[in-house]
Image: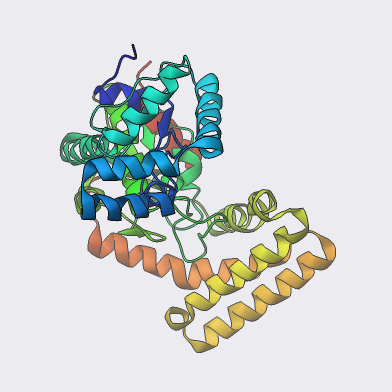
Amino acid sequence: MANDTRDFASLFLTDTPLMDVRAPVEFAKGAFPAATNRPLLDDDQRHRIGIRYKEAGQEAAIELGNQLVSGSIKRRRLESWRRWREAHPDGYLYCFRGGLRSRTTQAWLEREGLSVPLVIGGYKAMRRFLLENLDRQLACQPLWVLAGPTGSGKTRVIERLARAVDLEGLAHHRGSAFGRRPGGQPTQIDFENALSIALLKQAALDPGPVVMEDESKLIGRCFLPPRLQARLRQAPRVVIEEPLEERVRVTLEDYVQAPLKEYAACYGADQAFERLAADLQAAMDRIRRRLGGARHQQCRQALDQALAHQRRHGEGDAHRGWIRELLAGYYDPLYEYTMRTHRQGEILFRGDRKAALAFLRSRTEPE
């Protein structure tokens, strides 16, 4: 007999594989990082059974479900679940409330000789656990903020710290008008779930401070919880200070050169450059009003020329001009205004990227 569980913390701390048997439309609205969708019912079947349930009750709905998922359809479902179980012998399954769909799936698998435990309470209970954990961690978890103007390489530091949460990584976005990444962003629910799990894992390490990059209320379309916004405004800060030319170099790498591999993986090598070029141009146009007409025209022309040069010669140094202009003339004043008017936290350290990393490691990662 399967050992069903309601130990949600252990599931998330260990990244236990989860088989979500909800319909695809439900999974798309929100799920968990370790979950794979292997539905019992497809979207149309779920819709039809829901109507039958409202009109004639549960027994009639179950009867329709057995009719819709039978024969070859049932065999395909069972084969899909079997393959998942063979790949994840330590996994669990769940549906929305841990009720009929998950127990049906469990029973069918048991008749095939496969024992798969389920999560008691299903998606709804796990989601409630993560929301409560998120609120609790944001209330009590010590937090330090890594600040610095655009191009300082803050994410590079975050990625090298054990005691850190990469908000931009969770949001799949680089955090500015130019920050869109191929493949799109997670739903708000998925972002919140991933953030809660990251904080749960940090809390399990030790009581020391967790480092996060300074962010506004939105990372692309992902909205930071209001309590997190408040914490970022008030938390102690470590400030990276790098000269302009170094920030130009980092921005060129992070927004123009390195993304080509990501675009190639998403769209194919033959389309990667043109997709990236179109996204850079669209990003420049999104900040047209903020730049003002003349500056936007100047920067857009420089971007177009740099892209043409890169298209011909395969290297991106020509982008340095418009990047330098945007950093010095647009992003730096915006950063200075934000720090002056919207950030109250004590400054713990100022220094270049290497020194900031060393400071943070010495204070947040005990030997």
Residue 113 x %, y %: 47, 14
At 51% from the left edge and 66% from the top edge, which residue is drawn?
327
Horizontal side, residue 7 vs residue 218: left or right: left
Q: Nearer the viewer, residue 227 or 24?
A: 24
Q: Residue furthest top?
A: 1
Residue sitting at x 28%, y 34%: 100
Vertical position of residue 58 compared to residue 216: above or below: above
- Please name whichever residue, 269 or 154, is drawn nearer the observer in this view of the structure: 269
Residue occupying image coordinates x 79% and y 66% = 311
Q: Nearer the viewer, residue 102 or 295?
A: 102
- Answer with left or right where residue 29 lies relative to residue 52: right
Q: Quadrant of the N terminus?
A: top left
- Can residue 349 be seen by looking at this rendering? no
Seen from the viewer's position, the closer of residues 52 and 36 is: 52
Q: Is residue 139 above or below residue 263?
A: above
Q: Position of residue 128 (x, y in %)?
A: 21, 39
Residue 133: x and y, percent? 21, 35
Image x and y of residue 50, in percent: 29, 52
Res. 323 visible in picture: yes
| Residue farthest right in this picture | 312
Quadrant location, the C terminus: top left
Count the labels in the image.
0
